[in-house]
Structures are given as structure tokens and as C-alpha cells.
Amino acid sequence: MVEGPMTHPPLELCFIWHMHQPDYRDESGQMTMPWVFLHAIKDYYEMPWHLMRFSQIRATFNLTATLIEQLELCADPVKNDRFFSRWILPPERLDADERANVVRLCRSAQFETMVRPLRRFEALYHKKTYSDAELLELEVLFVLAWCSQALRRENPVVRELVARGEGFTQHDKERLLETLSTFVEGILPYYAECERQGRIALSTTPYNHPILPLLLDVENARRADPETTLPEAPLSLRDDAVAQIEKAQALFRRVFGHDPAGFWPAEGAVDEASAELYRKHGIGWIATDEAILFRSLGSGDRRALYRPYRYNGLTVAFRDHGLSDLIGFTYRFKPAAEAAKHFIRALEPIAAESETTPTVFVILDGENAWEFYENNAFDFFSELYGRIESLPWCRTVTMDTVAGQTASALEKLAPGSWIRGDFSTWIGQPEKNHAWELIYQTKRDVALLVEAPFDAETSAAIGRHFLTAECSDWFWWYGDDHATDFAEEFDALFRANLIAIYRLAGLPPPADLLVPVFSKRSTADFLTEPQAPITPSIDGAETSFFEWLGSGRIEEHRLFSTMDGVRGPIERILFGHDDARVYVAFEGDVASLAVEEGYLSVAIEESQRHLRFACDRPTRGKEAECAFGERIELALSRSLFVGSDIVHLRFEIDVAERIVQTLPGYGTLRIDMGEDYARHWFV
């Protein structure tokens, strides 16, 4: 059956999948964390593989330089990856610290979508101690959990081990790593072959994924947001900005045999000076976020979004933030067919209302979302690409194709990034600013305190460490807006690059570099479990300080980790239960939801029940109560959860059939119905 409207000419849909990992290499060149190898066996091959199963689908893949170089190292993970150099050893050869670190990494997999589907992995996951045989099983299962659907279908070793599910031996571990290492070695050639066939276009990013506008002029942060607090005594790092572009071009040329036609600026961060640098270096196109277009035009007219623009000879694409976030954050909660239909329904009015050929740019992280989807999003992409391919009014195009088309003139390019249209994710908070100040101080010390010129090898090494320290990822994790349980490792990597510069220059590292930049915290800081039973009134008001005292708490506005999206109106979730009901409250900009078209939907995973509450009126019933006021308050009868000791809830807020937020941002709200809170009692 053909879906959707007919238009002539058809809507052009341009996917850009951004593939990136920070530089995990220490001074010896060994990767200190295993995420490149793990995403290689899960995402980097599978994303173009999804596309190649559909003859009419085209897309652009942006491969960053730090990813490319580390993928090349993954052909020998035992030598080049610290985790796998320990993982491959028989468990009895690990000391206590090594054993603890291996267990910690193995427990980092997403539980619902990666651990639970492997029965033995789920059984081992919550154990406090492991025998050698159990640890070996845990290690193998962890890597199998990261194996893509492509590997599970096409690789005989992976297929056999997944089918067996338990009872693994050291020999199994060794042959698993051997076959995966060979597999990873073929990923970059696979991209090159897909490109040769005309199925994909390839692009890259400045070498170490820096926020180029901030390297050129830190005042760009204030131009994007006048309230930004800048680091003290900043320097222009223009020479480094140029090097970041040129080194990325040289690496891309070595690997793929030609110059990149376009760049995805790291974090979509642009300004007029960086755009001019790209143009001077022969780059034909860049892409960024819709917020930058609206600020550049001085208008929020969404009809202006669906076309390419040309600024000073450079083609610029502006992504539809909402459509991109639906894939990145929302569709993981929906059945694959429902999600694909929703996406197409969102495209239909764009196609129907455009007088000329509309071009819709959907641009997002190509690796981190899929671990939250069932089957690593295999079902989702099968539905999405299959349905798009059948549409007579829609065709997919690459950015190289778009860059060759007529574009609208853009007179001004506002500075900003893909998050909120400013640079606040990377500058402005004390930790972020301190990290910038450490870079500036290192630059000054090398310039002022070293008298003799460096030899070519030392100079190149110093330059390499400076470029690595400028990576956006370090600043992403500093401050209180993102969280990771590996903050210590990221912080150590950042400071290690600057320490290495002092040592190469023959200077003692200053004491500041020996002290962690970040304040100790983890994802646990944003989730507090309930401490006592609660029985609040469901009236949409903070009737009493005590009625939610002891509830669990999720600081939704501080939850986002390796990705970020439009965060939505809800900033905090409170939750708990008593003997009769489960209670949930939502705090934030609730007033914006008090409209006829606003709804709160609740999904109960265990029973597959779905409840829906109108935002403009209260609901009173035996099974559920819901009230909207200064907050949203919800009570669900225990009768909805009969037979379930553990309940998983997820919530969706939509206005006028547009999803504005899914909650919690990390997945589902888990409630232990048998918790009596006795461990919190005191006398």
C-alpha cells in the first residue's frame, strides 16, 4: 500500500549519520577505553549495512578522524586496547584491580536491551562476586551483547556462541576476539565500497572534533549567548583551527583516496570565520542545526528550513531538530512499525505544503541511540527504510547531491551549535572554563619558557597533544549538564595531554594539572531512590512539603549523557508508592501543557497497558487519578500491576499530536513494588 500524499517533484530526505569517538589513546598510543571497538562490532558496520539492504536508500556518513585512526588500531585490540589486553587473559591471571575494572565495564551495558535478552548475562549481571568460570562467562556475554544483528546473522562464530548462551571456555573467548578483530578490519573498506557504488557519501570533521568557533575567537560564546561567563585571559587558537582542518583532510585522503567534499563541524558548531576557513580549504558543504538558521534569518518560519542555503560560496544544510530527536530519543520507546509510520506522517505536511522541492535534513549521532532500541534498531531501520523506499513522493539523497543543486542565498551565519543554538555545553561553567584556562596557560608556558627551538619530532608531538586537548568531548563532560560513570577517565585523559606537553618541552607540569578538574559525581547523582512510603494528595499542587517527603527523584534536566536533545518542559520527576497506589509527579513548565491538545501517556511495560490523560482537565477513576496544575500529579492503582513485583513505566507528553518529551530520559522508571523501606528505618 502506498502511504502519504503525492507531490511533484518529490520531497528530498537527506540523512547524515555522524560517527564519532573521542581520542582514548594515552601517551603510549594505547586506547584506555574500549568504546571504539565495541561500537565497531555494534554500529559502524551495521549502519551502512542497514542501508545497503534497500536499493533506493541513500545517506551521508560523517566519519571523524579520531574514529578512523582508532578503528585502524582495533585490528589488534590486545595490543592497542587496554580493556581487551586484560579481557583476553584467563580470569585467574587478573589481579584484584584488573578484575574489578573488567567487571565494571561488563556491567556498563544497557540492561533492558543488551543484558536482558541474553538469559545467562542477566543471571550474572547482579552478582556481587564471581568465580573464575563465571567471570569468563560474563566477559564473553558482554562482548556478545555488543555484537550487531549483522554479526549475529552472518558471522558463524558469533551465531554459534549466541545460540549456546553459556558454558564458555577460554578458547571460545580467543576465537571470538579473533573473528571480531578481522571483522573490524574490514569496516573502513566497506564504507569505501558503499561510496564507490554510489549508495553513500562520506564526509569528516576537523581532526580532534574541536569547537572551531571557540578556537578562533572565544567571544563567539558571548555572541551566541551574552550571559556566558568566559574563561580568564583567553587566547586565539587560530593556527590550531587550521591544523585541525588540514590534518582531517589529509587523513581522509589517505584512507579513502580523495578529498572530502563536506564537513560536519563538530557539534554543528559554526560561525562566519570558521565557514570561511572551510571554503578556503576546498570544502563544498557543511551542516548545522535549525536554531542557527532561524537566528541567521531573524525569523522562526519553519518553511524556510526545508532547503539548502549558500553562504559565501559554501553550501549549508540546517537539520530539522525535532525529526532528528524523534529518531535519537523517542522512537526507541515505540514498536518499529509505529515509529516508522509516525516519522512518515511527520514528513507528509512538509511535502504537501511546499511549493518547490523541499529538502529535509535529518542529522544525528549514528552510534549511541541504538543500544536503547530492541535488536540494536534492526527492526526500526527495516521498517523505516522499507516504508520510505515505497513512497512515490519521497526520495533519499546524499549531501554531495544537495551541494550540487541550486541553493538560497544566506547573507549572515549566526554563531552557535546544535544544542540550544549556543556554546554553553562547552564553555561558561567553572569546570569547563578551568579546562580552557589550562590549555591557554600551557600555550603561554611553552611559548615563553622554552628558549631553544624543538626538533621536528618533538614539535609534532606537542602539536598533536594540543589538538587532542581541544576535543569537544572533554568539555562536554565537565560541568553539571552531562553525566557519565567514566568521568574520572575522561578527566585524566584531558589532563594527560597537557602534562605530556610540559614533559616534551622539558618543563615541570604545574600543580593545577595534577588535580582533577571535575567534581566527583556520577549518573547516580541524578537518580535518588525512594526512602519511605508516600501518600500524597493528587491535586496538581504542592499542598505540603511533607506529602512527597521520602519520594524518589529524577533530575531530568541533568540526565543527558553522550547525546543531547530538546529537553522538553519537565525538569524533575518524583515517584514512590504505598500499599494502595504508585505515585508520580512531574515538575517544570507544566503551564505550557495546559491546552486542549496536550496529553500525558503512560505505558506499563509488564502488562502492555497504555493510559492517556488530557492536560486540560483532571482524571478521577478507580484505576488512576491525574491532576494538572503547578505540577502534574499522577496516582496509579496497584490493581494495574497485579503479578508484577517490579514495574517499569515510561511516559510521553504530546501537544497537538507532536511528541515534546519522553520520560525518563534514560529509559524506563523502575519501581520495586515489594520495597518496605526497612533499611531506612532508625530508632
Image (spheres, helix red, strand yellow):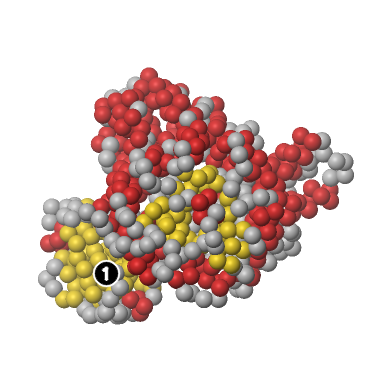
| Residue occupying the point 21% across, 78% down | 618
Farthest front residue?
8
Farthest top residue?
171
Farthest right residue?
451
Counting from the top left corner in percent of width and height, residue 605 is at 22, 54
| 306 or 331, nearer to the observer | 306
Res 633 → quadrant: bottom left
| 128 or 613, nearer to the observer | 613
463, above or below 552, in the image? above
| 464 or 314, nearer to the observer | 314
Horizontal side of residue 647 vs 371, given as left or right: left
Q: Identify which amino acid the numbered label 1 is placed on.
A: Leu
Disc 1, SS: strand
| Residue occupying the point 57% across, 46% down | 204
| Residue occupying the point 42% across, 47% down | 58
| Disc 1: CA contacts within 10 A as few (<14), some (14-19) or many (>=20) | many
Q: Is residue 609 visible to us here?
A: yes
Horizontal side of residue 264 vs 676, given as left or right: right
| Residue occupying the point 23% across, 75% down | 614
| 322 or 118, nearer to the observer | 322
The residue pinned by badge 1 equals: 600
224, above or below 506, in the image? below
Counting from the top left corner in percent of width and height, residue 600 is at 27, 69
Counting from the top left corner in percent of width and height, residue 198 is at 47, 41
162, above or below 517, in the image? above
Q: Is residue 97 visible to us here?
A: no
Counting from the top left corner in percent of width and height, residue 235 is at 74, 59
